[in-house]
Image (cartoon, helix red, strand yellow):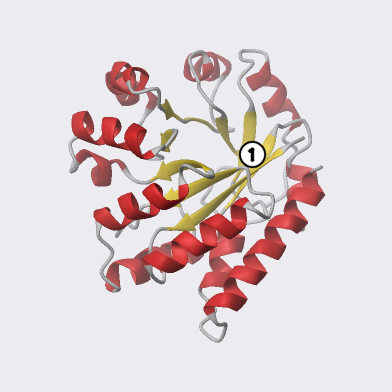
Amino acid sequence: MKKLVAYITSSYPEKSFSIELALALGESGVDTLEFGVPFSDPVADGPIIEKANHKALELGFKFSDLLDISKAVAPTVDSLWMGYFNNFYQQDMKKLLPLAQELGINGLIIPDLPHEEALLYKDLFDANNLANISFVAPTDGEKRIEEVVKDAKKFIYMVAYTGITGSGVAEDLQPFLSSIKEHTKTPVFVGFGVNPKTAKDKVKGADGVIVGSSFIDILLKEELSYSDKISKCSELAKIIKSEIN
């Protein structure tokens, strides 16, 4: 069974909604949740997720909101934190990672932390039994791929194309996937540009997909009630899970 990872922007539009949505997604086929930490300059994210980030900050997001959401959801649904390094660094990594483990979080996704710098925190992640999700991109050469994936845990985030999240750009991923899998047995999940129309093709040869913009697009529709947003996101999760399997 191929896996579905869903990204949601923490505390958008509010904390209680995020908790309710996350639990509903877990019941609708989502295997792992990414709790996005709102940031003013989310450089790896497309305009949809960027807009949700900015709205969450305007509404007063606090890091403590992320902790409250995690405490309510992580014991039930496999959960990760996705954010830019400054958000985590400001919390003091030596204190934050033990707290993440205590809350039931299983890893972090930090798109702007280069592999070489991530190695500085490897022992701290290992000591707290947390994965620091590794990224590989089509621009990576064979030696680079081998280096990045050799100690990868939980799954490898394969960037589906050289760009930002939220686009459905088509490309042949098979040679890239084969190159990654020559060097690791860690599952490879495809992110960037995954939606109901592209999921079936994107997942070929991979072990799962990561979907963000399609869910956030629903959350940004102000004409929808909270219950409608949760219903539509749940239905989307079921559709994508069916498409990839």
Q: Quadrant of residue 117?
A: top left
Can residue 83 be seen from the camera position used here?
yes
Q: Secondary structure at mark 1?
A: strand
Give the residue drawn at x 28%, y 73%.
Answer: 58
According to the image, label 1 marks what residue?
Answer: 190
Give the residue drawn at x 36%, y 30%.
Answer: 114
Q: Residue 211's spot in the image, x, y percent? A: 60, 51
Q: Name the residue nearer the viewer: 168 or 233.
A: 233
Q: Quarter holding the C terminus?
A: top right
Q: Residue 227's spot in the image, x, y percent? A: 58, 76
Give the residue drawn at x 52%, y 56%.
Answer: 22
Left/right of residue 212 with respect to residue 42 in the rendered view: right
Q: Quadrant of residue 196?
A: bottom right
Total marks shown come to: 1
Q: Residue 210's spot in the image, x, y percent? A: 60, 45
Q: Label 1 is placed on what type of residue?
A: Val
Can residue 160 be seen from the camera position used here?
no
Q: Residue 202's spot in the image, x, y percent? A: 73, 43
Left/right of residue 207 with respect to residue 225 in the rendered view: right
Left/right of residue 238 with respect to residue 53 in the rendered view: right
Q: Name the residue nearer the viewer: 192 or 129.
A: 129
